[in-house]
Amino acid sequence: MKFKIPFDPIYTKDILVRFIRDETRKFGIDKLVIGLSGGLDSSVSATLGVDALGRSNILGYVLPYRTTSQNSIDDAILMAEMLGVNTELIDITPMVDAYFKGETEDRVRRGNFIARTRMCVLFDKSYQHSALVLGTSNKTELLLGYGTIYGDMASAINPLGDLYKTQVRMLAKEIGVPDKIIAKPPTADLWVGQTDEGELGLTYEEADEILYRLVEERIRPELLLEMGYREESIDKIVYLMRKNQYKRTLPVIAKLSCRTIGIDFKYPRDWNN
Amino acid sequence: MKLRVHLAQFYPKLGNIEYNMEKHIEISGRAKDKADLLIFPELSLTGSNLMDLVSEVALEKNSKILNPLLEFSSNLDIIFGLVELGENNLFYDSAFYCSKSSLKYVHRKSFLSSPRRSGGKDYFSSGNNTGVLNADWGKLGFIISDDALNPVSVLPFIQKNPDIIIIIDNGLSFGFSSDTGIPKSALMWKNLISLYAQIFCSYVIYVNRVGFEDGLNFFGGSSIVDPYGETIISCPYFEESSLDVELDLQIFKSRPFNLSFNRERLESILRNLKDEI
């Protein structure tokens, strides 16, 4: 029988809506800003945000670069209209191109800069509106490091961070994200023709199943191989998880004092609730 | 004998004793005329995910901050949870039992190694009490949260036969269950307290908290199970709530099972084990 990752969309929706509401309001804040890409993850996060705080408290930003597909922009606007949230479209092309001045053809450099420019806009908007930035990175991306550190991985609260991509898809169905958005190939849309699965060399179904076995069930890679999983996929996933651990941590600090931040100065984030 | 119990499934503010004490006073005020025993969750005065705040919120047994609850306990027995600053400056995850305006009993959590909690044995020391108290209205067995997952914690109950086992918890939501809408962890606790009720022929009162701390979610679902293992009443999951219940302690005069055989047999097993060690 085919393995199926356990999931309960009703429970998940309930917890995540409560989580967003709680972790926002306990700091005296009642607004969220979110970047809408027209993709699955931002559509799901925005929908949960609306359920948690109401449409008038969600501020959507569509932040295209000149290479962003019109289809992505259209889907982002479709989602914003469907949710009834205030949305602003800001073309980030002048900001990005002003920096590079045409001097690089390195699409990864440019892609990272695009992601970080969006982050700058969102955090600026969050300050302007006394809001928090709602994150959109899912667990698959976080584990594989498939995201830009201090770019799309940056947020104040992230409701999707403990959900694999395939679980986000199931949740999307539960909360009414349009099929058109659920079905389209996931892409960071940082350059023309980019798709997540093409770049990773793995489908999300395969990646999630192997990640689930490795992370949740703590099955060792050599046993996964005996269970019939592809060696190439296992190796790639283990490699990416280890290589990108730094993206999931704070910058490392050299210990000098008796109490060093992150080592033996440890306070909860909710300290000031 | 009848015992009127009030369960307070509430949401403490992390590290904010002043706020939490106000809530304790408010809830005690509501309970004082309708209950004999009021029970708060684990670490109800401080919150759970404290990390380095442990040393800043710890209270000694004689702390004046506790006086309002001692006053309420003149007519209402109260159980609440806190970080206790004990002898030799050690910290304990403790439950205080106050009755007749004084602190009658302190129960300290023993097993601290749960990987899902920040804190645990990095901050707290292990208690070693038996967890059994003779209250005016009957015999009481205490368990604090994950101690229930270690059978050693309940060994004293084999000999002492508590009428009521009280489990106070900071039970986390995690895992997907086959029961839609409820986390796997909540089902695990539901099964466990039912099992304890049947094994020890006791009522089990389970009091959990709700709310979020740094993304950790506490599921609530406080409940009371009768000695047959059936849930008499329960609070909703994830919501602040309270329960008022009257328990008939006469039920122990006709226990569903005869424990004496079990007790003797287990005592003999323990003696043999001790010899082997």
Image (cartoon, rainbow, N blue to C red):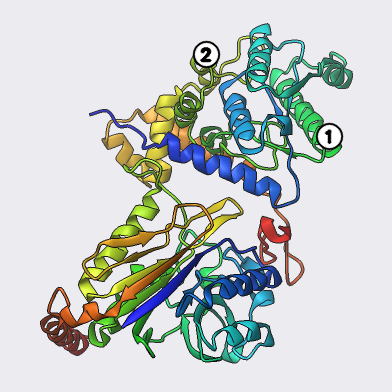
Q: Quadrant of the C terminus of chain B?
A: bottom left
Residue under pointer 2: A184
Q: Position of residue A10 (x, y in %)?
A: 44, 36
Please name the residue shown 41% across and 25% down the image.
Answer: A205
Please name the residue shown 42% across and 62% down the image.
Answer: B222
The reply to whether callout 2 and callout 1 are in contact (CB within 8 Å) is no
Write down the quadrant of residue A41 in the picture. top right
Please name the residue shown 75% across and 21% down the image.
Answer: A87
Q: Position of residue B223 (x, y in %)?
A: 38, 63
The label on residue A124 is: 1
Mark 1 lies on a secondary structure that is helix
Toward the top, the furthest residue is A70
Q: Residues within 10 Å of mark 1 (few under 14, many from 20)?
A: some
Q: Earlier in the sequence, mark 2 or mark 1?
A: 1
Q: Position of residue B121 (x, y in %)?
A: 51, 72
Question: Image check: B210 left or right of B226?
Answer: right
